[in-house]
Amino acid sequence: MNRFQTLAAAALFALPGLALAASSNLLSVHVLNEQTGKPAPGVVVKLEKKQGDAWQPLNQATTDKDGRIKALWPDAPAAAGDYRVIFETGDYFASHKQSSFFPEVPVVFHIDNTDEHYHVPLLLSQYGYSTYRGS
C-alpha cells in the first residue's frame, strides 16, 4: 500500500468517529433570519455557565453556512446547572449593513440531564426574535 492509500484508509476509518463526536455533543444551535427566510451564517455565539452571581465563559463559535453550530459544548465534562448562549446579533446585522434593535440575544437555560442533547434555535429579525428548546 502506498502512502496515499494509507492516508486515505486512515481518513475513512476516522470519519465515523468524527461524525459521532459531533452528533454526541451536548449542545447545538441554529440561527434563522426571519426576514429572508434563510439561515444566518456568521453569527458569533458564546456559551457561559452561571457560577454564583457571575457568568463563566466556556466556549465560542460562529454559525456555519447553514446557520448552525453543531458542537457548541467545549471539550470538557458536562455538569447540570444554568447556562446561557449569547447570540451576537448586532454584529451579524452590521455585517449586512443593517441596524438592529437587539445588539445581542442572551438565552438562559437549565441543563438537568447531561445524557440528553440540548438544541437552541433562534429565529431572528432586526427588531425581534424567538427561541425554544429544539430537538
Image: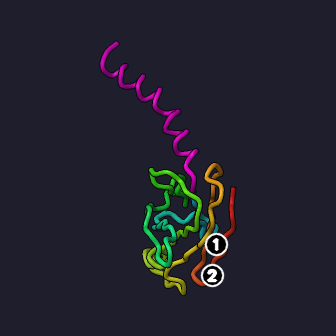
Q: How many labels, in total?
A: 2
Compared to 117, does 96 lie above or below?
below
Give me the residue at 35% from left, 12% from top: 1
Q: Which residue reaches farthest front?
A: 52
Provide residue 111's location: percent of width, then percent of height. Answer: 62, 61
- Label 1, label 2: how far apart the Cα atoms are: 9 Å
Q: Which residues are magenta?
A: 1-28
Q: Quadrant of residue 121?
A: bottom right
**At label 1, which amino acid type do we have?**
Glu
Residue 127 percent location from the top left of the image: 60, 84
Q: Is residue 58 left or right of residue 70?
A: left
Residue at 43% in and 67% down: 57
45 vs 91, nearest the viewer = 45
Q: Earlier in the sequence, mark 1 or mark 2?
A: 1
Residue 40 in the figure: left or right of residue 128: left
Q: Residue at x 46, y 65 (%)?
A: 42
Element marked by disc 1: loop
- Whether residues under marks 1 and 2 lie with C-beta atoms below 8 angstroms apart, the answer is yes
Mark 2 belongs to which amino acid? Gly
Quadrant location of residue 124?
A: bottom right
Does 11 appear in magenta?
yes
Q: Is residue 52 above or below residue 113?
A: below
**Residue position marked by numbered label 1 in the rendering:** 34
Q: Which residue is mark 2?
A: 128
